Image: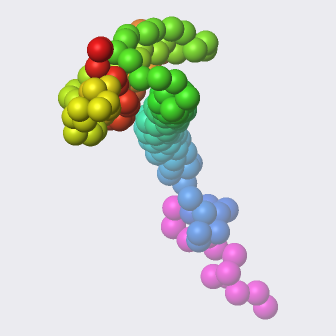
Amino acid sequence: MMNVAAIRPCEGHWGRAAGDATAESLIDDSAAGSATRRGDAGFTLLEALVAFVIAALALAVFYDGVVGGLRGTRRADATETALSLARSHLAALDATVLAPRVTEGLDGSGFRWRLSIKPAGAVPLGLANDADPVAGSAQAVLYAVSVTVSWSTGGDSRSVRLDSARVGANRASQ
């Protein structure tokens, strides 16, 4: 014999199992689910835009740092070249007779130099000798030497200046 309770449906659920949802609940769930999904999608797009803006700002700061570093490297290289040129002009004075003068010129690659030699003081080298009047007139002259090398990069003028003191012999006129 068959059990009648097993065949008889429960109240309000004709032909459905106990876990099935109603048609209204399926519509409500689908509407709520799509609304939730649309809200999530908008929030994800907002997150992506914020992340993009942050990444763009970080790249801009990085780019500025790289450009500034390259500019500083070029400036340091030009300063090193100018310093080397100024040292060369000071070293060339060792082979010449010191005399007061101002000379200028171009070294190429946009570098301009200026050499200034001025007497700073004189000291007699020997005592006056009655037998040799010329010996008493010998003097050591201290010269103030200045070498300036200047250049221009991007409208910005820069220069390097080296100052030195050199001793040279000077015979007073007889």
Q: Is residue 119 left or right of residue 159?
A: left
| Picture coordinates of residue 168, whole percent (x, y) | 38, 31
Q: Residue furthest front?
A: 131
Residue at horizontal 78 percent and vertical 91 percent from the top: 1
Q: Write down the region rendered in magenta.
A: 1-12
Q: Residue at x 69, y 76 (%)?
A: 7
- Residue reaching furthest bottom? 1
Q: Is residue 10 magenta?
A: yes
**Is 40 in the magenta?**
no
Residue 115 image offset from top left, x and y in percent: 41, 17
Q: How is the image coloured?
A: rainbow
Q: Is residue 144 left or right of residue 39?
A: left
Viewer-proximal residue among 141 and 160: 141
Q: Position of residue 161 (x, y in %)?
A: 36, 27
Residue at the (64%, 73%) spot, across then down? 8
Q: Is residue 36 above or below residue 77?
A: below
Q: Which residue occupies the foreground of this view, 113 or 103?
A: 103
What secondary structure prevails in the magenta region? loop
Q: Note whether residue 164 is visible.
A: no
73 lies above or below 22: above
In percent of width and height, residue 45 lies at 50, 36
Image quadrant in which the C terminus is located: top left
Looking at the rendered structure, the number of numbered marks drawn on it comes to 0
**Residue at horizontal 51%, vertical 67%?**
11
Q: Nearer the viewer, residue 7 or 68?
A: 68
